[in-house]
Each structure stands twice: as C-alpha cells, then as structure tokens.
Image (cartoon, grey):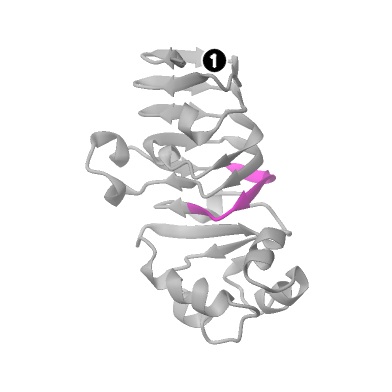
C-alpha cells in the first residue's frame, strides 16, 4: 500500500489548526515554512513526520500519541511554543554536528514551555535553558549534563544508574545543554524506585524537578 503524502511548504500560516493524525499519511513540514500561533495535533509515529527548514513561533503542539525518537526537531526553529503530551528520545535545538546539510545549522529553541509535557530521554542542544520551562516531577532535568557529569558521579546512585547513565553523560554531544527523564519509567529501567531516585536528585542544584 502506498502511503499518502501531505506537504506544507513555501508558505506562512497563522492561527491555523493542523491535524497530523492519519497513520497512513506521511506529513512533510518544510521547506521554507513558517507557522505562527498555530496548533498542531500530532497522532502519528515519528516515521510519519518529517520536519525541515520550518519556523514555529508561538505554536502549540498537542501530542496525542507518544512521539518516540524524533530527532528532526533540530531542523526547526522553535520560539515561544508549548508542548503537551508524551515525547521520548527526542532532540531539540541547535545540534550542528548531527548532519552537514544546511538545515541542521538552522535548529534553535527558546522561550518554549514543556510544563504540560511528559519527557523521557529528551535532549536540548545549543540553547539557553533559562528561557525554557521544563516539566516538573515526576520528570526531572539535568542541566549541562556534560559539564556536570563529574559532579554527578561523586555520589552513589541507586540501581544501575551510575554505570549505565551517569558515566555515559561525558560522551554526550558537547552541544547538550539539558536532558530530561520521566522518573517512573527511568527508575523501572534502572532497577530502583522513584523515591530512591529522588533522594539523590535532591542533592544537586544542577537538576530541575
């Protein structure tokens, strides 16, 4: 079966509501697309959503189906946007080393609000994290995980967090400015409880929760 393709490109849309919800459709956002004050309802897998050279300003993303391992946000400019719903393994911001193509040099994120989102294993690159609102507990966010990796390794973490997660932080891309996890799932994978995890998190000023 050949998938249907829908393109939004070479235009500017304002105050529109876009439903990207048909699982049999491939959605292409870009090139040269600007969206302002728009609402995007996402209910497709990452493999159905393509983002390239897009400017999102004051837009709302309503994620109705967990969006997993979607790196293409780094090919978009996000300013003043709000995210709602579940996202895991996603990357945002300016990560120029990811690819040599011009669109990888355009990624940015500022003044965005994730307070109503559930993030797990999501990274932020090349941005000022002070302009972002991260989700609170049971989510938690490492600020400057690469720079703080040595400090974070000075304590005993529960389960296998130390050797599996903390020791790996130093190898993250230098552009990584923040890393957000969802405590219940993170703890389950790490063979500990959220309560044990939180007891250690509370010791660090570089962790937002």
Q: Which residues are magenta?
A: 112-123
Residue nearest the observer in this picture, 187 or 204? 187
Quickly name the residue at label 1.
14
Name the dominant secondary structure of the magenta segment. strand
Q: What percent of the width, then of the height, locates residue 157?
A: 62, 81
Residue at x 72% of width, y 61% of height: 184
- The answer to if 15 sits in the magenta stretch is no
Residue 118: say if magenta.
yes
Is 202 positioned to the left or the right of 150 in the image?
right
Identify which residue is drawn at 62% across, 36% down: 82
Q: Residue furthest front?
A: 1
Note whether residue 8 is visible. yes
Nearer to the camera, 189 or 209: 189
In the rendered image, residue 124, in percent from the top left (x then y), is placed at 47, 52
Q: Position of residue 123 (x, y in %)?
A: 49, 54
Q: Residue at image x 61%, y 21%?
A: 21
Location of the C terminus (image quadrant)? bottom right
């Amino acid at each position: 079966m050949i998938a249907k393709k829908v393109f939004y490109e070479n235009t500017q849309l304002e105050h529109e509501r876009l439903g990207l919800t048909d699982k049999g459709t491939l959605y292409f956002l870009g090139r040269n697309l600007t969206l302002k004050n728009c609402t995007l309802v996402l209910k497709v897998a990452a493999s159905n959503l393509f983002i390239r050279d897009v400017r999102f300003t004051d837009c709302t993303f309503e994620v109705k189906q967990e969006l997993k391992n979607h790196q293409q946000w780094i090919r978009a400019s996000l300013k003043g946007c709000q995210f709602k719903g579940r996202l895991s393994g996603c990357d945002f911001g300016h990560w120029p080393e990811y690819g040599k193509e011009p669109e990888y040099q355009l990624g940015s994120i500022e003044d965005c609000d994730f307070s109503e989102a559930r993030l797990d294993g999501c990274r932020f690159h090349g941005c000022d994290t002070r302009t972002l609102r991260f989700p609170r507990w049971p989510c938690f966010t490492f600020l400057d995980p690469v720079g703080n990796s040595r400090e974070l390794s000075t304590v005993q973490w529960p389960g296998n967090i130390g050797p599996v997660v903390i020791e790996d932080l130093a190898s993250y891309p230098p552009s990584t400015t923040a890393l957000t996890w969802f405590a219940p799932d993170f703890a389950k994978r790490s063979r500990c409880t959220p309560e044990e995890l939180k007891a250690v998190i509370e010791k660090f000023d570089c962790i937002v929760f």
